[in-house]
Amino acid sequence: MALPPPPPGDGAAALPPPPGTDMTGICFRDQLWLNTYPLDRNLVFDYFALSPFYDITCNNESLRSRQIHPLDMSQLMMMTGMEYVLSEVMEPHLFVMRKQRRSNSEKVDHLLAYYILDGSIYQAPLLGNVFASRISRTMHHISKAFSIACSKLEKIGNETETDAVASESKTQKEAVDFKELMRIDKILVNLQKKLPPAPPPPPYPEGYVPPSASEEKAPDDLLASEALPPAIDPIIDQGPAKRPRFQ
């Protein structure tokens, strides 16, 4: 497919950005072309050549000008310089185009990669950029997690400090003040000294004789005497006497 004519006023078509330029934020799609031609391995390069990712100074463009298929590897391997090759194909949904610099028939340096997904062309990000983005995102989430954890710990610390102060005040309230106890004992002793002595016990009624200590029996002794079995008569309770047998 022929390239579109250059814009009016320009002597030549504008060159694309140099290799290594980040164009990952650009997406190209030509719906009119997709409605007109099938997207397969034979026409995918013509579709890719319409995008701003295409470098017209490549060897593929030289083959197109000579009416040779631009992805003919037998021709590209005999040339040196910039070229595009089709590395992966999953018709009709996915095509991966790789941009590389060829030094000879065997040595090539990979520069960039592009993929065509369901008719939309994207530049694949560089591996270093992918790692940098993932690391930056990971650091952001880790920093956010640490901030949340610190706020939680501060809240727990404040609650623990409040509980400790409340417990300490409660302990202080419940603690015994020995000085206060001694003061109260002193007041009670002074009051006891001011009171008259206790009256003597009343006398026994007339004719009553209090029991002596020898006659009194302790409850334990009564229980012990009740628990003893009755005495056994050695003569009556032993049964009939045995008589000797004479042979």
Image (cartoon, helix red, strand yellow):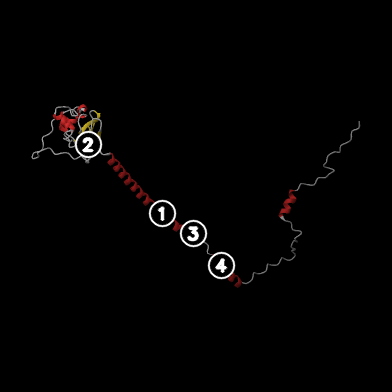
**Nearest the camera: 159 or 220?**
159
Give the residue number, with chain letter if any, for mark 4: 182
Helix, strand or loop under label 1: helix
Q: Quadrant of the C terminus?
A: top right
Report the amino acid beneath label 4: Met
Give the residue number, with chain letter if any, for mark 2: 122
Answer whether labels 2 and 4 touch (C-beta < 8 Å).
no
Q: Which mark is residue 157?
A: 1
Determine the CA span between mark 1 and mark 4.
41 Å
Answer whether labels 1 and 4 touch (C-beta < 8 Å).
no
Q: Residue at image x 39%, y 51%?
A: 153
Q: Which mark is residue 171?
A: 3
Determine the CA span between mark 3 and mark 2.
72 Å
Instruction: Please report whichever mark, 2 or 1, sits nearer to the chain's N-terminal start.
Output: 2
Q: Residue at image x 21%, y 26%?
A: 74
Helix, strand or loop under label 2: strand
**Nearest the camera: 94 or 155?**
94
